[in-house]
Image (tube, rainbow, N blue to C red):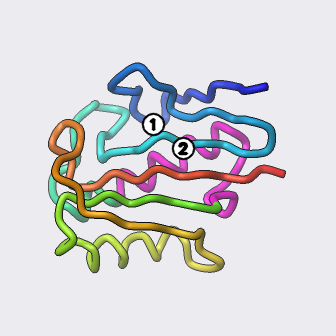
Amino acid sequence: MKKIINTESAPAAVGPYSQAVRAGDFVFISGQIGINPEDKEMAEGLEAQVEQVLNNLKAVVEAAGGTLESIVKTTVMLQSMDDFKVMNGIYQRFFESDPPARAAYEVAALPLGALVEIQAIAFLG
């Protein structure tokens, strides 16, 4: 059985998808971009977007009953791989110990002109 996860503490979906779906003990969190859920504006600059993306992921996983430590896998999509080092430094602050498995890719474009998008899988078992 699946359960749809929604929270006002993260931006609403910008298309026909859910913020997250819980299936058994797993939570599949849709890609988050750097939109502030309060003013619905995209954060300016790479650092601010990465910070906002990770705060959005945190809000969604918490709405599902987990924490950042529950995340077992992330996928990072960057508009430019030149931004990897900066993203990685901020990412490391959010996942200080026992970080999740991760893949990172450069992509041609992201929704709404975002510089970074991160999706995640969490385990709540």
Determine the main secondary structure of the stretch shown in magenta.
Answer: helix
Report x, y in % for residue 93.
47, 74
Ranked by sequence position, the earlier of labels 1 and 2 is 1
Residue farthest toward the right in the current orientation of the protein: 125
Task: Tell me which residue sits at (28%, 31%) in the image.
Answer: 39
Q: Is residue 81 left or right of residue 12?
A: left
Type of residue at label 2? Ala
Secondary structure at numbered mark 2:
helix
**Which corner quadrant holds the N terminus?**
top right
Q: Is residue 1 left or right of residue 95?
A: right
- Which residue is labeled 2 in the image? 59
Q: Is residue 121 left or right of residue 1?
A: left
Q: Is residue 105 left or right of residue 95?
A: left
- What is the total number of numbered labels drawn onto the structure image? 2
Q: Residue 103: which quarter of the image?
A: bottom left
Task: Tell me which residue sits at (59%, 69%) in the image.
Answer: 100
CA distance for labels 1 and 2 = 6 Å
Marks 1 and 2 close (CB-CB < 8 Å): yes
Report x, y in % for residue 112.
19, 36
Report x, y in % for residue 24.
80, 38
Secondary structure at numbered mark 1:
loop
Does the magenta portion include 3? no
- Bin the neighbour count of mark 2 within 10 Å (Cα to Cα): few under 14, some 14-19, many 20 and up: many
Range covered by the magenta-colored residues = 51-71
Type of residue at label 1? Ala
Report x, y in % for residue 49.
27, 55
- Which residue is labeled 1 in the image? 10
